[in-house]
Image: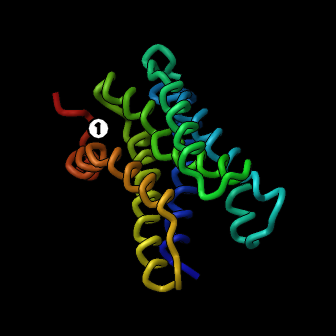
Amino acid sequence: MNVFRLVADLLHLGSIFILIARIHQTRSCAGISLKTQALYFLVFVTRYLDLFTSFVSIYNTLMKLFFLALDTFRVEYVLVGAALFALVFPHKYKVVEILWSFSIYLEAVAIMPQLFMMTRTGEADNITSHYIFALGGYRALYIVNWIYRYYSEDKYSDYIAWVAGIVQTGLYADFFYVYFTRVLKGKEFKLPV
């Protein structure tokens, strides 16, 4: 078993629980981008269609199963971009593969509405920032997973996931900086002005 993938998936699952706890605790979705959540919904619906057509492992199968005024990000740009990349750069020209590629490209940029909203407001509550950190940490650990697999498995390569994962982790770079310099020191998440 690849411990990097397991920890990354647990961190991703943890981010979801953090988000649910935050919404339950505050009884509000204020500060959470509905568009980011909708994009992630689309990511996972398109990525895991193969669960209905093929069996990889029990682990894989089990793991896959409003602040509206400030949420002004134009999601059509990321949707069209991900769709074009999926049509031009899939692993194979099969519907399920194109949809899988679409989900990978879309996931790389799905956090953008949330980051854009935080940029507009200049702040995020601590629970929301922990949620975003867990999402970014999940992807960063997947990069470690890919490096591990590259050196431990014969002929392992997945350029689509690698490039998209590096782009996705790069989008979190500024957030990680603020998170480490403010939130972990007990201060509020506020972007530099």
Residue 57 drawn at (x, y percent): 74, 73
- Name the residue type under label 1: Phe
- Can residue 103 be seen at all in this image of the molecule? yes
Label 1 environment density (alpha carbons within 10 Å; few <14, some 14–19, many ≥20): many
**Image quadrant where one finds the N terminus:** bottom right
Q: Residue at x 67, y 46 (%)?
A: 99
Question: Is 129 left, or right, of 180 in this rendering?
Answer: right
Residue underneath mark 1 = 189
Which of these two is toward me, 144 or 23?
A: 144
Residue at 56 percent of width and 63 percent of height: 9
Whole-percent x, y for residue 53 in the image: 83, 59
Picture quadrant where residue 188 is located: top left
Q: Is residue 54 above or below residue 127?
A: below
Res. 20 visible in picture: no
User: Is 71 on the left-hand or right-hand side of 48?
Assistant: left
Residue 36 in percent (x, y) is at 52, 34
Image point (75%, 51%), residue name? 49
